[in-house]
Structure formats: structure tokens, C-alpha cells
Amino acid sequence: MSAEPLLRVHGLCAGYGPVDVLHDVALEVRQGEIVSLIGANGAGKSSTLRCISRILAARSGSLRFAGRDLLAMPAHDVVAAGLAHVPEGRRIFPRLTVLENLEMGAYRRGDAAAIARDLHHVRELFPILRDRERQQGGTLSGGEQQMLAIGRAMMSEPRLLMMDEPSMGIAPILVTRIFDAVKRLRDQGMTILLVEQNARAALRLSDRAYVMETGRITLSGTGAELLQDRRVQEAYLGD
Amino acid sequence: MIRGRSLSPSWILLGGAVLLGLLDRPLGLGLVDPMRGVLVFALLGLGLNVVTGFTGLLHLGMAAFMAIGAYAFAIGTCDIYPFQLGFWPAMVLTVVVGAVAGFLLGAPTLGLRGDYLAIVTLGFGEIVQDVMKNMDAITKGTQGINPLPPPVLPGVGELGSEEGPWYWLFLGLLVLAVMACRNLERSRTGRAWLAVREDELAASCMGIAPIPAKMYAFATGAALAAMAGGLWASLYASTGEPGNYDFQVSILALCIVIVGGMGSIDGVLVGSLAMIGVANIALPKLAAWLQARGVVDPSNVLGSPNNWKYLVFGVVLMVMMRVRPEGLLPARLGRVGGGR
């Protein structure tokens, strides 16, 4: 294929204490792609993202992002390298205002004009955040908090946006809005790595996808291929 | 809606303190003397507020840094040591020593979370007291280091037994500390503190290194506590015995922060006024009033309101937790849920 992928994960193994949860995981995300990682609860999807953003230590393997070795940097430098992580459960700052939450996303940037431009962009993407700007983050509904978490990640001017279960625990009407926003980000050229339990929604908007089972990648293909795959349909699409 | 720039409660309180300093003697209030204690504890509270209020680290050994400050100041000024730096250089040294001590305690311990860190700080508070008590050669054991020479201020001369100049000195330093804390809260470092307090993992996802942020908080808090200790020693011309800097003092600092409102500089000021004001002003006045009317027998220990201090503190804390757990002047009042 073409040039080096933006993100390349190879032979990744990791675990918690004595328990191994990732076994030889390999995946790639190319510039401009939206790639999703689907699978059951506990398959290792979140752990994979946590390894990539260096929150969880990798036991072996290699992680390369934009020509750099992620394993050589601490967690707090990953975002400065251009990789933003919207963590599972949103993890917004509850007692800071919505605006302060967004500003925190730009913590490692100094270019005031570009930050203002990105803030404008986030407000366009999620108008509700503009209305709630002076409210404490913790007073938002789950769906609004998810929008805030995505907006906050966008404020770091990422080259790759990783989202962990953006639809989890959110009212269906807001899930639609969030997936719409993901689509708009994709159309604007953002590269996205998406972890989702809602496999159908994820596969529909993905260029490619990987299926994880018990810490291993077991299937991969384009979103359309996997939607048609009988094993995927039986296991994850409820057909 | 246009919201006018409202005067912050801090400046109202500090303005009130200035007014009190001016009116105390003409009106014969006699409040300046006990108010000096309020000012020193406000400094200690500001220090703890950085650690516990801004950064969310429960610290139960703040008195240790106050002790370290008192001894650093005493060693820098007392004529039994060769340094005899004078008030201002010694105070600068005290603040630096406090910050370094904060770093030294923080470096090995800040990887600990929540309760574990609290226990370590509690232990540190006890250890420092014992070290001061037993390191006779340097600290003079339970005698404490004394006498300390009085500060010399330009235009005022040597501060003696008159209370006024001391009051203005302490108030001036407190104003400086309040300004420093305000600027810190709004700085990059301050934002990192708040982010770490709210969610350490998310803070790290924002590109904030949590451990260095906590180290700065520890060092800043310790520096302010050391300054309070230095002033305390200077006021009494002695460090006093190491037992003066015990767990009660650490808890009192925590009460000030909780009663005032965690993470609120305004709160620290009102909290120290409430807690120390009750202990040093209201209860003694009540005791004198009752005694003058012959209501209580002075020989009856329980009958004197001076001995009710900890009972009052305990009741105040319980009532606060029931009625207003966010504190008297919570952080960012009026910004939360405000208009569009």
C-alpha cells in the first residue's frame, strides 16, 4: 500500500498485575481513515487504547505514531505528539466549567489564535456546549458530557482522535447526535480510531474495522465487509 | 445580563482588617493582639488550601512545615548561631527551606493515592516533632530556640511589645500571600492542579504530568506554612517547644480550609477568622464577661468558655457538614450555573 500508516501497533502484549489481557495485537490506522475496534465486553478494546495512549504499560510490542515511538514517551506527552484520547466513561472535570474543560484540552498549546479557532469549531460541532459554557461539567447530562469530552480532545488539535465507547450509557437520541458528530469529523478529514460496543453503528461509518476476542484481533476488513460477515452478524449484530 | 465586576470577599475581608488596625486603638477594642494569630493561621490555611483545596491531596501534617519554618527562621536569626541574618533575609530563607522540605516529602510519596498519602503526611507530622525534640544540639530540644531578635522595619525601627506594627507586618505579608495564591490559581500550574484534583487520568490525557504538578503544590503549600511558622516564632521571640506544632495544629488548618470552602482563597480568610477568631477572641471575651458577672466560678475548669474550644470546633464542623458542606465561601461562587 502507500506510505507509513499514521498509527501502527505491532505485537502488543499487556495486562493488569498477573493477568494478561492483550496478546500480540496488531493494527494500523492510516491518515484520514476512520477505523473501529469492535468486540464483546472485556475483549481488550479499551486496554488497547489505554496502551496506545500510554496509560497502561505495554509488556512488549511496538507502538509507532506519526514516525515516533510512543513507547519512548510518558502518557502526558502523547497528546502533545498529536494523539488525543477520549477515555471510557468520559472523564470530564466535573467541577470546572464547560469552557474551562475545553480550555484544559489545549493545555499543551500556546498559539492563542489557533486555540480560539478550534474553540469556535467545537462550538459549531456541539452547539449545546456553547449554551452551557459557564455551567460546571458535572451538571451536564451523560450525552452532553460525552460531547464535552470529544470537544475537549479536539481542542488539542489532534492528528488522531481515539474514542472509547462514546455511546455507553447515553440516551438513544443523543447517541445519534454523537455519531453524527463523528461522521462530520470524518468528513472534515479527521483520522479516528473508534472503540464501540454498538457494532452496527460503528461499522457503518468506518472505513475499516478490527474484531477483538479475548485480547486478540480475530478478524479485520472494511466496514462493509464485516457488516456482511456471517460470524460478525451472529456474534455482534444480533441477526 | 451584564454582571458588574464585584469586589471579591477576600478584599472586603482584608479591607476590614485594615479598618480594624486603624480603629482598634481609638475605639479601645483590643482586637489587634488576638488578630495576629488569625493572620498567621490564615497563612497556614492558604498553604494547605493549595495542597488540599486546589490539588485535592489530603494533607494531615501541615504543622510539620510550620515547625520547619519556625526552626529555620530561628536558626537564621538567633544569636546562639553564627548566621544572624536579620528578619527579611531569614524570612526568605525560611520560605525556601519550607519549599525544599515540601519537595523532599513529596518526591518519594506523591505516587501514593488518596488515603495512603494522607497517612504518610500524618506520620511526617509526628516524625518532625520528634526529630525537633531529640535533635538537642541544633534545636535545643523542648526548650525551643530563643530568644529571637525582633524584626527591624524601615521607618518603624525595632518591633517591640507594641502590637500595632506586628499587626501591619503580618497583614502586609498575608496580602502578598493572597495575591500570590490568586495568581497561581489562574496560572498554568494552577490549572494543572485543578485538573489533577478533578481527575488525574484525564489530566494526564490533557498533557499534564500529574506528579510534578503535585510536587509544585506540595512545595508551594509548605513554603506558605513555613512562612507562618517563621512569623509565629518571630512574634513570640521563640520557636516554643516542638509539641506546639502537633496534630491539633494540622487539623485546625484543615478545619479552616473545610469551614471556609475547599479550594477557595476567600474561604481560607473567612475560615481562619471563624475558627481562630472564636478560639482567641470570642471565647476569652465570653469568659471575661461571665466571670465579671460572677456567673461562673473561675476554679471550675468546665465552667470557663476558654476550655470549650475543641468542643466548639467539633460542633462547628458537624453543623457545617450538615448545613453547608461546601463551606462558607465556596470556590467560584456565582460562576457555577450562572447566566448565559
Image (spheres, grey):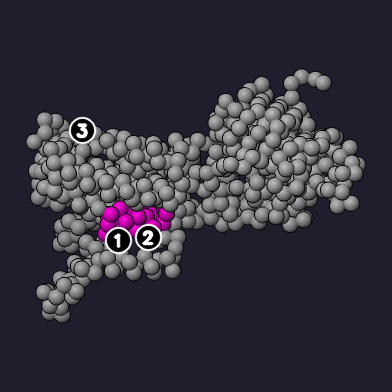
Q: Amino acid at mark 3?
A: Pro
Left or right of B81, for residue A21 = right
From the image, give the main secondary structure of the stretch colored magenta: helix
Q: Can residue B207 be spotted in the picture?
A: yes
Measured as percent of width and height from the top left, residue B178 is found at 34, 45
Question: Within the image, what quadrant is residue A48 found in?
Answer: top right
Which residue is rendered at x = 70% and y = 32% of the image? A24
Residue B100's place in the image compared with A166, above or below, is above
Secondary element type, mark 2: helix
Camera-side residue of B319 and A26: A26
Task: Name the subunit of mark 3.
Answer: B
Q: Amino acid at mark 1?
A: Met
Q: Residues within 10 Å of mark 1 (few under 14, many from 20)?
A: many
Which residue is rendered at x = 74% and y = 31% of the image? A27
- Marks 3/2 in contact by CB < 8 Å: the verdict is no
Left or right of B175, for residue A38 = right
As measured in the structure, the alpha-carbon distance from the residue carrying label 3 to the one carrying label 2 is 34 Å
Task: Name the subunit of mark 1.
Answer: B
Badge number at residue B89: 3
Question: Within the image, what quadrant is residue B286 found in?
Answer: bottom left
Q: Which residue position is annotated with label 2?
A: B259
Badge number at residue B275: 1
